[in-house]
Image (cartoon, grey):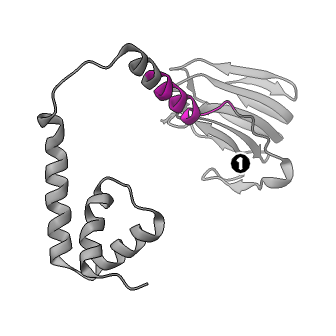
Amino acid sequence: MEMSHENFEELCSLYVLNLLDEVEKERLESHLQTGCSLCGQILKQTLEILSLLPYILPSEALPLHVKQKLMEQIQTEMKEKAPRPAQHIIRSTEREWLSSPIPGVEIQPLWSAGGRSARLVKSQPGTVFPPHRHRGPELVYILKGGLLINGKSVKAGDFCISDPGFVDQDIQCEEECTFLLISNEDDELL
């Protein structure tokens, strides 16, 4: 059905109040895209008038039951939009080993949030990790093989915790090693 220009002018006020159905809204928006200055002016004037309404109407307190209902609606909407706790399973078949900037080292990123991350690290014998200072606690669980961390040998099943501010000066891979590393992403390389 073809609409007259008068029909478009009538729709402008309803458009500003978001009272058009989808078909009417699409028709008016298509018409506005043609660059109709008259309808554009009507929309602008209607928006200006609408923005003045709160200043024209008398100020009255909401009845208690209306205020309570409004607050309940707001709380319901906030709960619906709030992120729900979730569980994520990252299957071994969904991960790949990625090369690292450190020669002889590959990583599998597992998780990252709030500047911390968990990853699997696989290093070849003779690999030397650069000295670094921990910005937060670092957790290392050896899954296979072993490392020499600051002169201390750690093997499969061992768990190493480094406090924030601690400096790892000398980490070497004694044999092929795979470990779980949980650390800050912004540890300082020295």
Q: Picture quarter containing residue 37?
A: bottom left
Which quadrant is home to the N terminus?
A: bottom left
Q: Vertically, is 64 above or below 179?
A: above
Looking at the image, residue 44 sits to the left or right of residue 8; the answer is left
Q: Which of 9 and 164 is in front in this view?
A: 9
Q: Vertically, is 117 above or below 51?
A: above
* Residue picked out by circle 1: 107
Was residue 142 drawn as part of the magenta stretch in this picture?
no
Q: Picture quarter containing residue 52?
A: top left
Crowdedness near tag 1: few (<14), some (14–19) or many (≥20) residues, C-alpha within 10 Å:
many
Q: Is residue 133 visible?
A: no
Was residue 72 drawn as part of the magenta stretch in this picture?
yes
Q: Vertically, is 12 above or below 73?
A: below
Looking at the image, residue 3 sits to the left or right of residue 76; the answer is left
Image coords of residue 129 (percent x, y): 64, 40
Image coords of residue 106 (percent x, y): 72, 51
Q: Give the range drawn in magenta.
A: 71-85
Q: Which residue is drawn at 19% across and 54% down?
A: 47
Image coords of residue 20 (percent x, y): 40, 61
Q: Vertically, is 183 above or below 123?
A: above
Looking at the image, residue 103 sits to the left or right of residue 28; the answer is right
Q: Which residue is drawn at 19% across and 48% down?
A: 50
Q: Which of 74 and 125 is in front in this view?
A: 74
Task: Tell me which amino acid carries mark 1.
Answer: Ile
Q: Picture quarter containing residue 132?
A: top right
Q: Can residue 93 be seen in this view?
A: yes
Image coords of residue 24 (percent x, y): 41, 69
The secondary structure type at the circle numbered 1 is strand
Q: Residue at x 60, y 53 (%)?
A: 101
